[in-house]
Each structure stands twice: as C-alpha cells, then as structure tokens.
C-alpha cells in the first residue's frame, strides 16, 4: 500500500490525470497469468464508469441527508453485525447487501477521508492488517489460494465540490469449491445478477473460516 500512496501522489501531479486506481489480481480464474497476487496502477484522463456512478451516489445522499453515505452505511452494518467479516479500529470488511459475486466484500475506512494519501501511518498499518485477515479467510474457505480482483476506489483528482469516502472492493469468482466458479451469463448478464446465497450466509461462512491460514494449520509453509 505505501507503493500505491507514492504512485497516487505521482499521478496526481500529472496535469492530464483525472483518476488513479490501484488494483490487484490473483488466480488464473481471474485471468491472471502470474500465480501470485500482483497489482497494477492505472491513471486515466477521465473518471471511469464505476467510480463516476459512486460519486453520483455520494453526492445524492449528501444532498438528501447532509451526511456521508458510507459513514452511515458502516454504522448501520456495525449495529446489525450480520454481514461483518472482520475489522479493527480503523477499517471494516463486510459483505455488502448488494453483493453480486458470492463472496464479494467491501473494505471501508471508519474515518471519513477521500484518498489513500490521507491515511496516517497507523491507518496504513490497519489497512494491511484487515487485508491480510480477509485474504486469509478467503484462502481458508475452500483451502486454496483464493482468486479475486481487488481495487481501491478513491476521490478523483482535482474533484472539488464532490463527496467521497475511501473504500476497496473484492470481487472473487469462486462459488461452491476451489474449482467451481460463478459465471455471469444469460439473465444475470442481460437482466439482473442472481444471488446463489444471501450476503448474510456469505459473511457467516467467511467469519467461520478463521484467520489461521489453512497451510499453517496443516503444518505447511504458507505460500501465495
């Protein structure tokens, strides 16, 4: 994550850059040719579709309620507790109620801030802690290196007058086992995604997966 902070600062200095996104891919099921998790950093001249839609949602919620959408959402999820997976004093990982992928998760900073540059040193360590704990739970779920795409969504550059709250998305494809994945086809692609099980069920299974890596439990040196 410190590398992403440095890259973001460098991209923000480019006069043409409007958005910068750090993301990580893992596993052949996500089209990753390298077996280990590996990241990329893209800077673009326009705001990509997904962050642009989120920005509209942030602005609409602020206009209607005078508060931050994700601040309120994290507070509500913490009160209910059903969809929480893990967390610490600075970040929370949860299965969002709108999850499309079976074990999709959202990682959100508890403090209202817009970019990874705004994280202090304690919060950066806390983010690393949550990411390690969450990805260990993923691996433990089917006792396999769990594939996923993860991306950081932060405020567009020079984006004054808009609300934003830093968060990360995890989109993993596995459904029932280490070899059975979910495919978006037919009605799911052309109409609306269908849930194979509820977000509450997904969260419960991730909670039960534990944070001692399955290779460590088996006495095998952990490998990516």
Image (cartoon, rainbow, N blue to C red):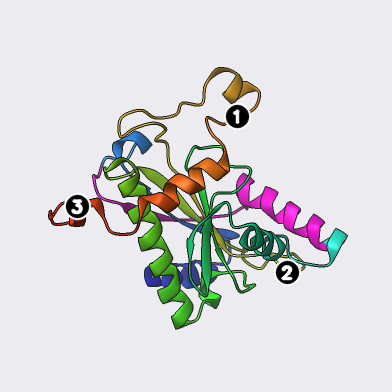
Describe residue 179's horizontal placement relative to residue 175 as left or right.
left
Which marked residue is nearer to the observer: mark 3 or mark 1?
Answer: 3
User: Residue 39's spot in the image, x, y percent?
Assistant: 36, 54
Q: Secondary structure at mark 3?
A: helix
Q: Which residues are magenta?
A: 34-62
Disc 2 crowd rating (10 Å Cα; few below 14, some 14-19, many 20+) is few
Q: Please name whichever residue, 213 or 28, is drawn nearer the observer in this view of the structure.
A: 213
Numbered label attached to residue 108: none
Residue 95 against residue 70 in the figure, above or below: above
Residue 8 against residue 28 in the figure, above or below: below
Q: Is residue 45 magenta?
A: yes
* Residue in view at x 59 percent, y 49 percent: 96
Q: Give the distance between the C-alpha atoms of the residues marked 3 and 1, in whole angstroms.
A: 34 Å
Q: Quadrant of residue 113?
A: bottom right
User: Residue 48's spot in the image, x, y percent?
Assistant: 60, 48
Q: Please name whichever residue, 143 or 115, is drawn nearer the observer in this view of the structure.
A: 143
Q: Which residue is mark 1?
A: 193
Nearer-N-terminus badge (3/1): 1
Q: Give the distance between the C-alpha atoms of the residues marked 3 and 2, in whole angstroms.
A: 47 Å
* Residue in view at x 77 percent, y 68 percent: 161
Q: Which residue is mark 3?
A: 215
Q: Secondary structure at mark 2?
A: loop
Q: Give the distance between the C-alpha atoms of the residues marked 1 and 2, in whole angstroms.
A: 34 Å
Q: Which residue is mark 2?
A: 160
Which marked residue is nearer to the observer: mark 1 or mark 2?
Answer: 1
């Amino acid at each position: 994550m410190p590398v992403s902070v440095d890259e973001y600062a460098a991209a923000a200095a480019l006069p043409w850059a409007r958005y910068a996104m750090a993301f990580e891919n893992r596993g052949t099921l996500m089209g990753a040719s390298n077996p280990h998790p590996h990241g990329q950093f893209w800077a673009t001249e326009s705001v990509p579709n997904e962050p642009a839609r989120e920005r509209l949602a942030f602005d609409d919620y602020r206009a209607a309620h005078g508060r931050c959408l994700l601040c309120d959402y994290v507070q509500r999820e913490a009160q209910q507790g059903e969809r929480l997976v893990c967390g610490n004093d600075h970040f929370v990982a949860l299965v969002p109620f709108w999850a499309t992928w079976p074990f999709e998760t959202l990682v959100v900073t508890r403090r209202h801030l817009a970019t990874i540059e705004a994280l202090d040193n304690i919060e950066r360590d806390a983010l690393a802690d949550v990411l390690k704990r969450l990805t260990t739970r993923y691996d433990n779920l089917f006792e396999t290196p769990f594939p996923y795409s993860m991306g950081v969504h932060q405020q567009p550059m020079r984006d004054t007058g808009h609300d934003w709250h830093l968060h990360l998305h995890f989109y993993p494809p596995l459904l029932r086992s280490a070899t059975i994945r979910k495919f978006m086809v037919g009605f799911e692609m052309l109409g609306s995604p269908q849930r194979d099980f509820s977000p509450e069920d997904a969260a419960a299974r991730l909670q039960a997966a534990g944070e001692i890596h399955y290779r460590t439990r088996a006495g095998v040196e952990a490998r990516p």
